[in-house]
Image (spheres, rainbow, N blue to C red):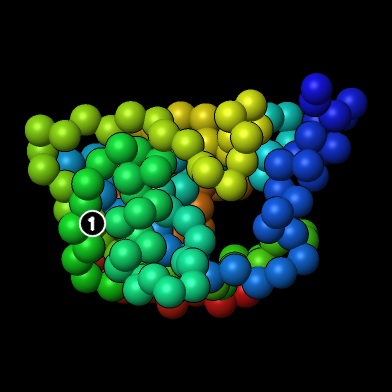
Amino acid sequence: MLPASHSDFSDALLQAYAGRVRVRVGGLLLREGTMLLAAHRGLLPDQAAFWSPPGGGWQFGESLKEALVREFREETGLAVRVGRFLHLHEFSQGPLQALELFFEVLADDHQAAELGHDPEHAPDAQLLTELQWFAPRQLQQLPPAQLHPVLRLVLSPDDIFVPQLRFS
């Protein structure tokens, strides 16, 4: 059963991540000038989607690249190879805090992305709601609050590969 209010529901979804610092890895996958992003629920009011590159938490005993390969497989079903390190981002929003490391990822063009799951959440309490390929011009049409900060200034596919260090 869902909590009574959206706020309670969001709080319940994010409880596992609140009040602690996480290290997250994210992958930037480009195909034909578009980038694969995942919609997350629970971060914004009114059930608005928050679009971010696929990725997730770094677990003890893994290398960063192993974590990214695992997270991409869980969230998208894609087997990826990790390329260059691109961006470092300090994420801080309410009770959520993370250090995020973004890498280029490569996948075979014939592989189709399919929305996966997060094993940290029950099937009826998944944060991920959708996968979508976005062209840079489409990113600019989203409200800034709905787009991960490392993507807000992307005007062309080449901009993805301009390294960024972003601290709050």
> In x, y percent, where is residue 40?
56, 39
User: Residue 12, relative to residue 160: is it above or below?
Assistant: above
Q: Is residue 141 visible?
A: no
Q: Which residue is mark 1?
A: 105
The image quadrant of residue 103 is bottom left
User: Residue 67, relative to residue 108: is it above or below?
Assistant: below
- Apparent side of residue 63 relative to residue 145 in the rendered image (left or right): left
Instruction: Report the quarter where the C terminus lies.
Output: bottom right
User: Residue 66, relative to residue 115: is it above or below?
Assistant: below
The image quadrant of residue 31 is top left
Q: Residues within 10 Å of mark 1 (few under 14, many from 20)?
A: many
Instruction: Report the quarter where the N terminus lies.
Output: top right
User: Residue 122, relative to residue 99: is it above or below?
Assistant: above
Q: Residue furthest front?
A: 61
Q: Secondary structure at mark 1?
A: strand
Residue pictured at 52% horizontal, 30% vertical: 129
> In x, y percent, where is residue 165?
44, 77
Q: Is residue 80 visible?
A: yes
Front one among 24 and 91:
24
> In x, y percent, where is residue 135?
28, 38
How many numbered marks appear?
1
The image quadrant of residue 8 is top right
Identity, as a three-letter code, of the amino acid under mark 1: Val
- Apparent side of residue 24 relative to residue 31 in the rendered image (left or right): right
Residue pictured at 25% horizontal, 41% vertical: 78
Residue pictured at 35% horizontal, 54% vertical: 70
Residue pictured at 23% horizontal, 56% vertical: 105
